[in-house]
Amino acid sequence: MAKLLMITGLGSAVDLASGRKGAFYNTLEEFHKYWDRVDIICPRINSRSDLGSAKRSDLVLFGNVYVHISPWPLVFHPFWFLKKGLEIHKEQKFDLMTVHEFPPFYNGIGAWIVSVLTRVPYVLEIHHIPGYPKAGSFKEKIYRYLMSSFIRFDAKRAKAVRVVNKKETPEFLIKAGVPEKKIVYIPSMYIDLNIFKPTGLSKKYDLIFIGRLVENKGINLLFDAVAKIRNNTHDLKVVIVGEGPLGNSLKNKIGRLNLKDNVLMYGRAKDSSEIARLLNESRILVMPSYNEGGPRVVVEAMACGVPVLATKVGLIPDFAYSGAVKIIDWNAEDIAKNAKNFLENENEMARMAVTGIEIAKQFEKEEAIKNYAERLKTLLG
């Protein structure tokens, strides 16, 4: 086997250090088996509640995964990344780096320098283009511009550029000047089909949203759509699963739109089993995001036999003609119309449920992670 250095972002650091056992933790649970050793470099965690009981630089998982969380502020992260990366290489002689890249590109710049000094190849991993295809904020517009301007240079020394969908991200990268031959599609949806499956639970909710309560998830569009549906369907039940900075404003919006009998602010689900239960208790998943890498929850819903309404982001264009997903616009009226049509058409929902279950099988956790590991090793030659 070989040794791998993974350079990742703050979300992954929080996932690993907090003990919440989220998506990255669940991936490593299987992924670590394919390597002698995995070292992970992460940015600083500022919140003590997110840090949990782990010390900043001595978190060890699964016996061979070593997590190195920066003690330095984010502005100094490239320097700490360089220092720590060279230290690890001197001790362990790792064979490959994977680099989760996003603006402001400190991961890619750091990997470029480490690669020059160690001659170790690296793979840029583009899980998400901020602000593309549609920006949810001015900041995302700036990030989209930076991504289109810099990614060609960023990818120049990389061995390959991993993308996690077949259409949306490759099209953006090619237009931005990344050579098509460098782009490698390796899905990042690793779905445990023993957890995400139809369970026959009775349906408590008509619509479900799962995700962070942030602007780019389109959550305000969903609330406006629910208000429009409620005018015709007073017993509509919607569950919102997640936390985030928009939480308080959304609770206020429930009052303004008189939705207190229709919308349940559930909060964060504690683990995958709870997400699977909530999906099985729901009739339709609505995902009105402005931009995404996946989103994972769409495939989880498919695996549970739950029909999906989603905007054309991330993986969704890959499924556009499969019959498993209904594409919606970034428009409350369109979301309301499609949701209402679905709720009144049980036969259509049943057909989509069957198709979705079949599509989800290609993302079965163990096989998908094995494919990821083997593809990385192929890049090593």
Image (tube, rainbow, N blue to C red):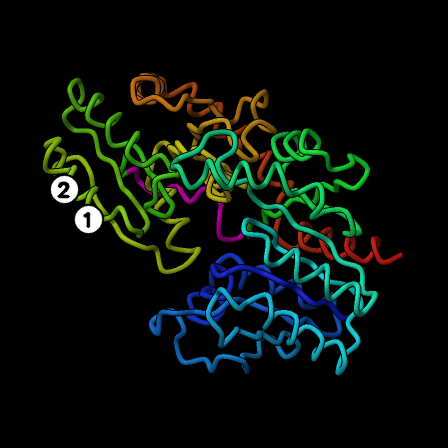
Residue contact at pointers 2 and 1, CB within 8 angstroms: yes
x, y percent for residue 216: 39, 38
Q: Is residue 193 visible?
A: no
Q: Amino acid at mark 1?
A: Asn
- According to the picture, the residue beneath numbered tag 2 turns out to be 252
Residue located at (71% from left, 41% from top): 152
Are there few (<14), some (14-19), or many (20+) residues within 10 Å of tag 1?
Answer: few
Quick check: 11 above or below 117? above
What element does badge 1 sit on?
A: helix
x, y percent for residue 132: 52, 33
Task: Point out the stretch of residues depicted in magenta.
Answer: 193-203
Are there few (<14), some (14-19), or many (20+) residues within 10 Å of tag 2?
Answer: few
Q: Amino acid at mark 2?
A: Asn
- According to the picture, the residue beneath numbered tag 1 turns out to be 248
Quadrant where the image shows the N terminus: bottom right
Chief secondary structure of the magenta span?
A: loop
- Left or right of 115, for residue 73: left
Residue 201 within the magenta-colored segment of the rendering? yes
x, y percent for residue 159: 80, 51
Q: Is residue 145 visible?
A: yes
Location of residue 284 by image quarter: top left
Relative to the observer, which residue lies in front, 126 or 102?
102
Residue located at (30% from left, 40% from top): 202
Quadrant where the image shows the C terminus: bottom right
Relative to the observer, which residue lies in front, 106 or 250?
106
Quick check: 250 above or below 69? above
What element does badge 2 sit on?
A: helix
